[in-house]
Image (cartoon, rainbow, N blue to C red):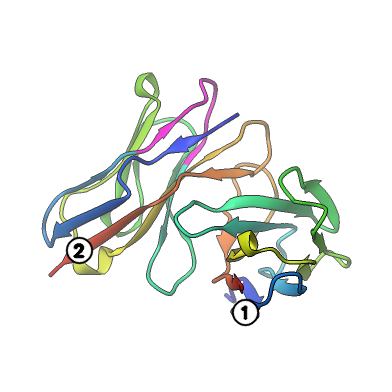
């Protein structure tokens, strides 16, 4: 069965620091990958998604992620974080087939200190 | 555009009691999902509807959980009887369809505490 691992459970950064959150998935076939963000008190929102094509995907708010098939990874990056990026970040993958069934990682809680 | 609406936002019940959560998806969205998010974990799909039919309920504990979407719009998720381990956030989500190109939009969730 598909699974997603997020190894960083809590990350604390100062403003302007660079961010990289790890995400690894288990399935060796065709995958579709997502990063969702949940700001305090708000609903889950899609940050970016990868289906095919250019493995470097750009999302909202300056975030990007790189799909590296050989490493089964889809790490999230941002060159310079802001206090407003404080949130929980979830990596997700579709389970295979043609349906929209998302399998989520356990999430990474990011705290950005001003 | 209105988002996915859920109610109630917060509920505290005793174990063995019942609870029901309601969801109104984004207008026109044929696919509706219920996810369970336990503290410290990522959301887990409980059930997926396409219009008023069930597409996937493989992870729904059917001995105590039930869900319906009778008219293909609103949906209710019921737990009866509740157990302590059901304490979680119940997220409703919707998308235009169930093919991979459709973005899934989430509601703010219904927080359940079972004591």
Q: Is mark 2 on a helix, strand or loop?
A: strand
Q: Nearer the viewer, residue B67 or B11?
A: B11
Start and end of the magenta stretch?
A: A23-33
Q: What residue is rendered at 83% in x and 64% in y?
A: B69
| Relative image position of residue A53 (x, y in whole percent) | 43, 30
In this view, which residue lies farthest toward the right? B70
Task: Bin the neighbour count of mark 1 within 10 Å (Cα to Cα): few under 14, some 14-19, many 20 and up.
Answer: few
The residue that label 1 is drawn on is B12
Q: Quadrant of residue A68?
A: top left
Quadrant for the C terminus of chain A in the image: bottom left
| Relative image position of residue B17 (x, y in whole percent) | 76, 74
Q: What element carries label 1?
A: strand
The residue that label 2 is drawn on is A112
Q: What residue is rendered at 71% in x and 45% in y?
A: B59
Chain letter behind tag 1? B
**B16 in the magenta segment:** no
* Left or right position of B80 against B89: right
Chain letter behind tag 2? A
């Amino acid at each position: 069965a598909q699974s997603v691992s997020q190894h960083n459970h809590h990350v604390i950064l100062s403003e302007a620091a660079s961010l990289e959150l790890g995400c690894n998935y288990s399935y060796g076939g065709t995958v579709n990958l997502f990063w969702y963000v949940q700001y305090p008190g708000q609903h889950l929102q899609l940050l970016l998604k990868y289906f095919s094509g250019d493995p470097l995907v750009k999302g909202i708010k300056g975030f990007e992620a790189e799909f590296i098939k050989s490493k089964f990874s889809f790490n999230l990056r941002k060159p310079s974080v802001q206090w407003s990026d404080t949130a929980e970040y979830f990596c997700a993958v579709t389970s295979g087939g043609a349906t929209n069934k998302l399998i989520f990682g356990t999430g990474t809680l990011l705290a950005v200190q001003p | 555009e209105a988002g996915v609406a859920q109610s109630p936002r917060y509920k505290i019940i005793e174990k063995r009691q019942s609870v029901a959560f309601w969801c109104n998806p984004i207008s026109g969205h044929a696919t509706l999902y219920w996810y369970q998010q336990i503290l410290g974990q990522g959301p887990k799909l409980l059930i997926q509807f396409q219009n008023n039919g069930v597409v996937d309920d493989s992870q729904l504990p059917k001995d105590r959980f039930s869900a319906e979407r009778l008219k293909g719009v609103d949906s209710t998720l019921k737990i009866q009887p509740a157990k302590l381990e059901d304490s979680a956030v119940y997220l409703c989500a919707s998308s235009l369809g169930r093919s991979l190109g459709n973005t899934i939009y989430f509601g703010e969730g219904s927080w359940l505490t079972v004591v």
